Amino acid sequence: MIERFVAWFLSFGLKLLTGAHGRWSGCAPVPVQRVYCVNHTSHLDFLLLWTALPGRMRRLTRPVAAADYWNAGPIRRYVINRVFHGVLVDRSGKSANPLEPVFDALAEGQSLIFFPEGTRGPGEGLLPFKSGIYHVARHAPNVDVVPVWIDNSYRVMPKGMFFPIPLLCSMTFGVPLRLLEQEDKDPFLTRLRSAMLELQPPQ
Amino acid sequence: MNVPREALLILAGLGVALLIASAVGFGLHRRAGDGPRRGTIDNLNARIRAWWVMIGISGGVLLAGNGAIVTLFGFLSFLAFREFITQTPVRRADHTALFVSFFLALPVQYLLVGVQWYGLFAIFIPVYAFLTIPILSAVFADAQRFLQRTAETQWGLMICVYCLSHVPALLTLRIPGYQGRGALLVVFLILIVQASDVLQYIWGKLAGKHKIAPAVSPSKTVEGFVGGIASATLLGASLWQITPFTPLGAAAMALLITLVGFLGGLVMSAIKRDRGIKDWGHLLEGHGGMLDRLDSVCFSAPIFFHVTRYYFSI
C-alpha cells in the first residue's frame, strides 16, 4: 500500500519536472508482454519510462537494473525492490547466469525495461550494446522487443549531479522487432541499435 | 468569498461562448467529413476542448480568491519556463544556476507578489537573479559560449517568470474607488489578450490573404491582425464597467494590450523558428505548449501593469 503511494508520488514528481510525454509512434500503449529497449543516460530513465506508461501497463512492467548500484544503501534497495519490483542483474561476472532473474520474469509474463548499453552513456548517441538483450531475445523469441528513445533526460540530472532541474522529456516508442530465425548476435544488435537511433528527434 | 459579481457574469458569458463554439465545431466536423479541411477542423475542436479546461480552471481559481490567483500564475510560470529552457542548449555547468532559477527565484518572485512588496518584486529578478545567474555559471568554470548561455537563462527568467508575475501583481494596485476588485483587472487583461489571439485566429482563417510576417510567423495575416485587434479593442471598450477606466480609456488600454501582445507573439515565434520548432510543447491539445498560449500575456502584462499603476494607482 505504502509502496504504491511512493511509486505514485515519485512518478507524479517526475511528471511535474519533465512532462514525461510518451509518443507511441510505432506501437500502441496496450498491456501485452514486451521488452522495452531504452537508451540510458540518467538514473531517472526507468522511472521516466514507467511514468509514460498508462496505469494498467505499469503494474506489468519491471525495470532490469544493476544489482551493484541499486543494492548499495537502504533507500535504493527499498525503491528498486519494494516499490518498482526491479529485476536485479549481477554485473560482476561472478554469477553463472546473470540473466536468470530476467528469464524468470519473462516466464511470469511480465514486461521489462531493458538498457542494452548496460550502463549510462554521455547523452548523445549510444554506447556499444552488451550481449544481454540478444540472449533475452533468443530466450523469448515470441516477445516483442520495442525500441524506445528517451530524449533530454541527461540534461535533467547529468552524471554527478544530485538534484534534477525541470526540462521536458519525451519518450518515443518505435515499431516492435523480434529476433529472426538464424539471426546472429551482431546483426540483431545492429538492427536494434539503428531502430533506436532512428527515434531520436531531429536536432 | 468576496468575488466580484461581474467576474461570475463574465464566466457565465464565456461558458455560453464556448457552448456556441463547441456547437459550431461539431457542425463543421459533421460537414467536413473526411474532406481536405479535416485537419484544420480537428485542430479547432481540440482547441475548443482545451478552452473548456482552461476556463474551468480559471473560474475555479477566481472563486478561490487572490492567493489562488498568485499560486496559479506561479505554476504557469514554472510550466512556461520549463518549456523555454528545454529549447536552450544548457550545459552541465548551468545546472546550479537553473536549479536556483526554478526553485528559488521563481517561488520568491511570486511570494513577493503575494505579500505585495512592490519595491522588491519590481527589481528582484532584474537585479538579484540577473547577477546571480552568471556568477553561478562562472563558478562552475565553463567558459564555452558563456554569454549566450547566461543570456538565455536570464531571458527565460525575465519573460516566463518576471513578466508573467505582473498578472497577479495587478492585485497589489491601490486604485481609488476600485478596492477589492483587483481580480477584475486580471480578468480584463487575460480576457482581452486571449480574445485577441482567438479573434486574430478566426479573422485569419475566414479572411486571411496577405501574410504579415512571413519570415517569422507564416500563419499570421494582415486581415487577422487588423480584424482581431479591432474586435478585441471593441470588446475591451464594452467591458469598461469592470475596469477603473472610462469607456474610451478601456478601449485604449485594450488596444495597447493587444498590440503589445501581438508583437510579443511575433518575438516568441522568431525564437521558435530559429530553434526549428512549431510549438513550445504539447501540454494543451491543439494549442501546443503553455508558452504558446501565454506568449502574448508575457509581453502585455508588465506594460498594462505599469501604465495602470502610473495613471490610476495612488
Image (spheres, coloured by chain):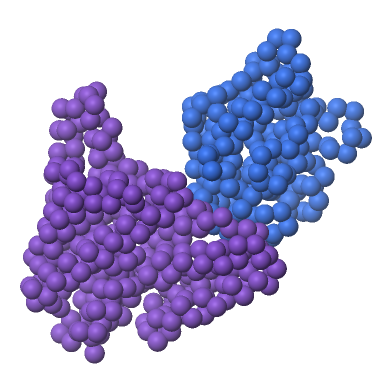
Chain colours: A blue, B purple
Residue occupying image coordinates x 23% and y 35% = B41
Q: Looking at the picture, how far across and down is residue B26, in whole percent?
A: 18, 34
Asked if residue A81 is positioned above or below residue B304 in the image, the reply reads above
Quadrant, the C terminus of chain B:
bottom left
Q: Looking at the picture, how far across and down is residue B105, in whole percent?
A: 51, 72
Residue B238 left/right relative to B184: left
Q: Residue furthest right?
A: A94
Residue B308 left/right relative to A142: left
Tell me the quarter of the picture where residue A131 sits.
top right
Residue occupying image coordinates x 46% and y 50% = B275
Residue occupying image coordinates x 22% and y 67% = B257
Residue B132 seen from this side: yes
Residue B88 left/right relative to A113: left
Q: Nearer the viewer, residue B157 or A179?
A: B157
Residue A82 seen from this side: no
Asked if residue A58 is positioned above or below residue A187 in the image, the reply reads below
Q: Nearer the viewer, residue B135 or A41?
A: B135
Q: Looking at the picture, how far across and down is residue B36, in whole percent?
A: 24, 26
